[in-house]
Image (cartoon, rainbow, N blue to C red):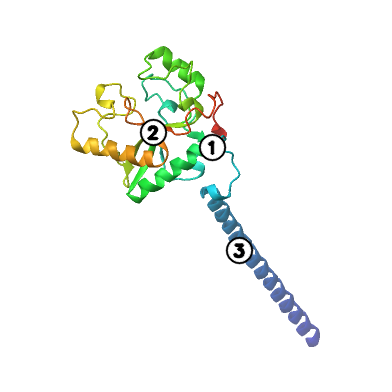
Amino acid sequence: MKLKTILIVFFAVFFSACNNSQSGDKKTETDTDIINKDSTVEIKSDKILKKQLLDTSNVNFQDSDFVDITLFSDSFVVSMRYATKDNFVDTILYPCSECLLRYEVAKDLLRAESEFEADGYHIKLYDCYRPHWVQELMWKIVSDPGLVADPKTGSRHNRGSAVDVSLVDASGNELDFGTPFDDFSKKSKTFYPDLPDTIKKNRLYLREVMQHNNFSGINSEWWHFSHNCGTKYKVSNRGFDCDSL
């Protein structure tokens, strides 16, 4: 009888220990699963947050292709005014703030940005490609060929070969160019004489670097630069790729 009692107690203790061990193993596996899941979420989150920039040395674009300049560099300050009401027509004209340019033009703008960046500045983009129908609307509001290109011939913006820009410093502060973008006063003329020397130097610096990278300025607007490809590309009415932003 004593032997039977001892065996019963022995097996009771044995199975209890086994159950506790299995329970402990399961708990450890569950904890491990949670850690792995958390790690996976963090990795996926990192992949989403990190934008993979394109390199002009290993992409297969044609010079005539429209590309978003921010796919190649995140150092530009994008402030597309016609995607807001903060413009001379007080109307939103673009569905999103995307800077599209012909690939040939984009490559030279990237070189200009690198040159400015070496001096501690960055290009601020106000306008890039502009659909032709927007040009027609602007012409109806301001029918002055000295200020707005006649849509009959189309502007360089309509061809994806012009940009409206200014510069900001490393803190994001815009350099003083004398007038805001899209100002139609005499002071907006690039070589307006009655301006402080600092403003004249800023305008000249902007113009020199842009010219060094195949862009030409105009006298009526200090911010406007057309690429030296001229009218090589056709006027376009293509839309924007807002879904990719």
Q: Position of residue 192 (x, y in %)?
A: 23, 27
**What is the spatial separation of the Cα atoms under label 3 and label 2, in whole angstroms?**
64 Å
Q: Is residue 185 visible?
A: yes
Task: Give the crowd class for mark 3: few <14, some 14-19, many >=20 residues within 10 Å.
Answer: few
Q: Which residue is mark 1?
A: 67
* Residue sitting farthest toward the bottom: 3
Residue visible at 23% across and 35% down in the picture: 200
> Between marks 2 and 1, how big is the CA–CA gap?
21 Å
> Horizontal placement of 14 versus 200: left or right?
right
Which is in the foreground here, disc 2 or disc 1?
2
Mark 3 highlights which residue?
Answer: 31
Q: Which one is earlier in the sequence, the residue at label 1 or at label 3?
A: 3
Relative image position of residue 115 (x, y in whole percent):
38, 47
Can you identify the residue that label 2 sits on?
216
Mark yes or no: residue 54 visible.
no
Q: Amino acid at mark 2?
A: Ser
Q: Nearer the viewer, residue 202 or 92?
A: 202
Q: Is residue 231 above or below residue 121?
A: above
At numbered mark 1, what does the secondary structure look like: helix, strand or loop?
strand
Q: Quadrant of residue 92?
A: top left
Residue at horizontal 33%, vertical 27%? 221
